[in-house]
Image (tube, rainbow, N blue to C red):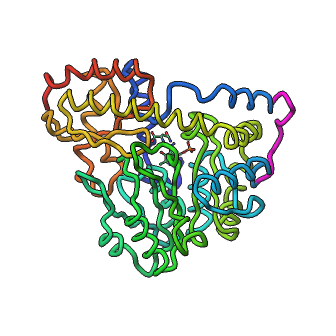
Amino acid sequence: MRTASVRLQGLDTSIFAQMSALAARTGAVNLGQGFPDADGPSEVIEQAMRAMRDGHNQYAPGLGIPELRAAIARHQQRHHGLVVDPETEVVVATGATEAIAAAVLGLVDPGDEVVVFAPYYDSYPAMIQMAGAVRRTVTLRAPDFRLPVDELRAAIGPRTRAILLNTPHNPTGVVLRDDELAAIADVAREHDLVVISDEVYEHLVFDDHRHIPIASLPGMAERTLTISSAGKTFSFTGWKVGWATGPAPLVDSVMRAKQWLSYTSGTPFQHAVAWALDHADADVVALRDDLQVRRDHLCAGLAEIGFDVTVPEGTYFTTTDIRPLGFDDGLQLCLDLPRLAGVVAVPHQVFHDDVDAGRPFLRWAFCKRPEVLDDALARLASLASHRG
Ligand code: PMP
Ligand code: GLN
């Protein structure tokens, strides 16, 4: 009996699930999967409980409850100056993951090409494959992981349908600058492409870096789907409330695909996120400030141990080059790390088509309590004695 469809061929268990399972099995400190180990604001939890007690426990409308769609529209206007109609230009999804899936399935045909930037978030190639489409990968290369505009241009062909973008970028922590966004926008307009922009880390940006949604560039609002999620913004990754905003015809395609995936998304959490978007800006700023301190702490600690550290401009993640410690294969080191040091990280190379480009890099999550980061750093201090 055949047990898996061809469309799943080559799609392994997500590295995040693999690495969390490895941490659980070995008792290692988990700096692999990107989830905070502390809850988001307690008032937001109260709102979810209140919604349940108030009887908001049945199916929500497919597009999402009107209160949440209106709050998302206000959020886009307040933070980014983007004007979207909550009736037709916002769709709620079960996490950004579902929004990405529905966007790809709803907008891309078999044989179409989708441009992605590597290292990529692992759901992108999976969904492109499930849609029967072809990915064209543009590699962000060390040491600075900036956008190679010429390579982007070279990746576009007659079958290109969409560019799937992620800024702030997981795993490198790069926040795309004005000139990089302008270059992508030029290409998208010239070739009449859809841009699917994954901005789940939109509020987790450090120092004086700034997140700019590509939809806010001239001529881009009409061709861009902007995706985000309450998981990262409010530290509730398990609630799985995400959304997409954009022009009505694109949002309608997402909605039509989404209705056959989850039909609708969890009702009480939508009520709580609607409240949070309107009332919890200060908590989000506090989270960002706090994450910046933890970023600095982890980066300094990893540098002291001997890694070559890339300080991220945004996200939950720091990247290190492992070669100064004598190692050269990140995947192998991640598999060995629980035994060598009792810590789990994530290798970049699984997010690349050009595996060599990612081989010497590891991603470390700093969205963990300070004592957990301290514990991880103390454990890693012995690593130099195991030089590869
Ligand atoms: N995109 C990126 C870049 C991510 O890092 C993640 C992980 N949280 C997601 C999408 C998925 O978000 P969600 O948990 O809301 O599905
Ligand atoms: N976004 C999280 C990360 O990058 C993981 C989410 C998941 O496991 N799908 O670590």
Q: How many discs appear?
A: 0
Q: Residue 197 location, x and y as percent?
A: 52, 59
Quadrant for the C terminus, please: top left
Picture residue at 22% right of the left edge, 21% below the top: 381
> Quick check: 83 left or right of 329?
right
Q: Residue 369 location, x and y as percent?
A: 45, 23
- Which residue is nearer to you in this view: 131 or 108? 108
**Which residue is most to the right?**
55
Picture residue at 30% right of the left edge, 41% below the top: 311
- The residue segment tinted magenta is 52-62
| Residue 59 shown in magenta | yes
- Which residue is nearer to you in this view: 148 or 292? 292
Q: Residue 109 location, x and y as percent?
A: 56, 71
- Which residue is nearer to you in this view: 126 or 373? 373
> Quick check: 258 left or right of 379?
right
Image quadrant assignment for residue 47: top right
